[in-house]
């Protein structure tokens, strides 16, 4: 299951990466959203490859003969990349909320502008902050080489009070805080959407159905990212609770759920970016043209509403 999800994660995120590079070669610049999406796709692919390599090593080294240091380094990178993925997704949702929602608070607006002017710096700092946040694991966690049923080699686990406190802080920093930011952005976007629809309905006196064009596509993408994130957050916190409190060694389950999350997130991002979606549909239909028996699977080309920059 994880292998299949790893394949889809790498496929969709490499597609996003290549499309972003192609767009850059045409426009000679990246928009802030494209910069964040590119950083997120790179983090997704790196996280997935290291997870799959760790799982492969765990199967090959069934008797835990290899020194625990390689396992420790891989797990450290996995946790830091997970931190990066969470905050990149949150940062992207924050960006879309600033583009869709205008606020009368001047101080808040200045903070938003300052952050968005340094998007490239922010997406470079997030992985460094993730690595710095995970470094204490080498001190407060202990590695166990266990070969019993449902056990893995070189697992980093908290064994004392300091370790449990650090794990709680890590989960707050890597999961809860970006989740809170995304929920705040979700409420802002939803409130903006409701107010905008009321204004449009009032301006037309209810005679016509309100139309938002491609802006609705961006709203759907942003809200979908939040929904997928919250669902993953609940599952991830539960799995970490089982590992920390009940001492169940189910880290492979966290890799599987993270793979589901990165796959679904990549699909949502492709759908939200009109150029990505149209190109993917075109290539899919071209491939099906080679096999007439699969003609029924062809996807109709999406309509082109008024252009809104995403």
Image: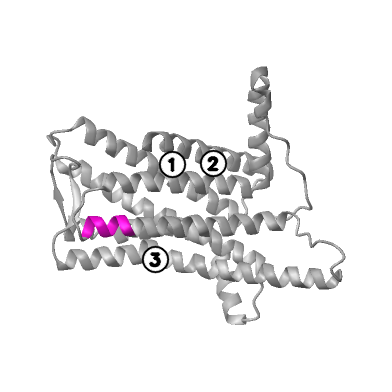
The Cα atoms of the two marked residues, 3 and 2, are separated by 28 Å
Say whether marks 1 and 3 touch (CB < 8 Å): no
- The percent position of residue 114, horizontal first and vertical second, equals 56, 70
Residue 40 falls left or right of residue 68? right
Sequence-wise, the earlier of marks 1 and 2 is 2
Sequence-wise, the earlier of marks 3 and 2 is 2
Q: Residues within 10 Å of mark 2 (few under 14, many from 20)?
A: many
Q: Which residue is mark 1?
A: 45
The Cα atoms of the two marked residues, 1 and 2, are separated by 10 Å
**Range covered by the magenta-colored residues:** 238-244
Quarter assignment of residue 51: top left
Q: At 44% across and 64% down in the image, what residue appears?
A: 178
Q: At 56% across and 66% down in the image, what residue appears?
A: 186
Q: Judging from the image, what secondary structure is the residue with disc 3 in?
A: helix
Residue 154 falls left or right of residue 222? left
The number of numbered discs placed on residues in the rendered structure image is 3
Frontmost of labels 3 and 2 is 3
Tell me, yes or no, whether the highlighted magenta stretch contains residue 46.
Answer: no
Say whether marks 3 and 2 touch (CB < 8 Å): no
Q: Residues within 10 Å of mark 1 (few under 14, many from 20)?
A: many
Say whether marks 1 and 2 touch (CB < 8 Å): yes
Q: Quadrant of the C terminus?
A: bottom right
- The percent position of residue 110, horizontal first and vertical second, equals 59, 76
101 w.r.t. 286: above or below: below
Viewer-proximal residue among 81 and 7: 7
Judge whether residue 310 can be spotted in this image.
no
Q: Which residue is mark 3?
A: 176
Viewer-proximal residue among 140 and 198: 198
Q: At 53% across and 54% down in the image, what residue appears?
A: 36
- The percent position of residue 54, horizontal first and vertical second, equals 28, 39
């Amino acid at each position: 299951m994880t292998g299949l999800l790893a394949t889809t994660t790498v496929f969709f995120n490499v597609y996003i990466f290549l499309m972003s590079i192609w767009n850059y070669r045409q426009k000679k610049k990246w928009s802030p959203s494209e910069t964040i999406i590119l950083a997120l796709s790179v983090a997704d692919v790196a996280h997935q490859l290291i997870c799959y390599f760790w799982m492969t090593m765990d199967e090959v080294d069934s008797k835990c003969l290899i020194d625990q240091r390689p396992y420790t380094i891989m797990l450290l990178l996995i946790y830091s990349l997970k931190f990066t993925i969470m905050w990149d997704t949150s940062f992207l949702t924050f960006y879309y909320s600033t583009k869709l929602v205008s606020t009368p608070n001047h101080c808040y607006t200045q903070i938003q502008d300052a952050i968005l002017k340094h998007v490239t710096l922010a997406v470079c700092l997030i992985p460094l902050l993730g690595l710095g946040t995970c470094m204490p694991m080498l001190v407060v966690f202990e590695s166990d080489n266990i070969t019993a049923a449902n056990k893995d080699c070189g697992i980093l686990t908290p064994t004392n009070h300091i370790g449990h406190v650090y794990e709680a802080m890590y989960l707050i920093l890597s999961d809860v805080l970006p989740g809170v930011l995304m929920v705040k952005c979700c409420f802002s976007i939803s409130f903006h959407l409701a107010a905008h629809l009321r204004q449009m309905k009032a301006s037309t006196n209810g005679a016509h159905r309100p139309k938002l064009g491609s802006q609705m596509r961006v709203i759907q993408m942003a809200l979908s990212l939040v929904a997928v994130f919250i669902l993953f957050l609940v599952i991830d916190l539960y799995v970490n609770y089982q590992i920390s409190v009940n001492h169940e060694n189910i880290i492979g389950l966290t890799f599987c759920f993270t793979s589901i999350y990165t796959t679904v997130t990549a699909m949502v991002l492709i759908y939200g970016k009109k150029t990505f979606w149209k190109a993917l549909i075109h290539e899919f239909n071209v491939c099906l043209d080679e096999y007439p028996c699969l003609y029924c699977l062809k996807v109709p080309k999406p309509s082109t509403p008024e252009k809104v920059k995403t």
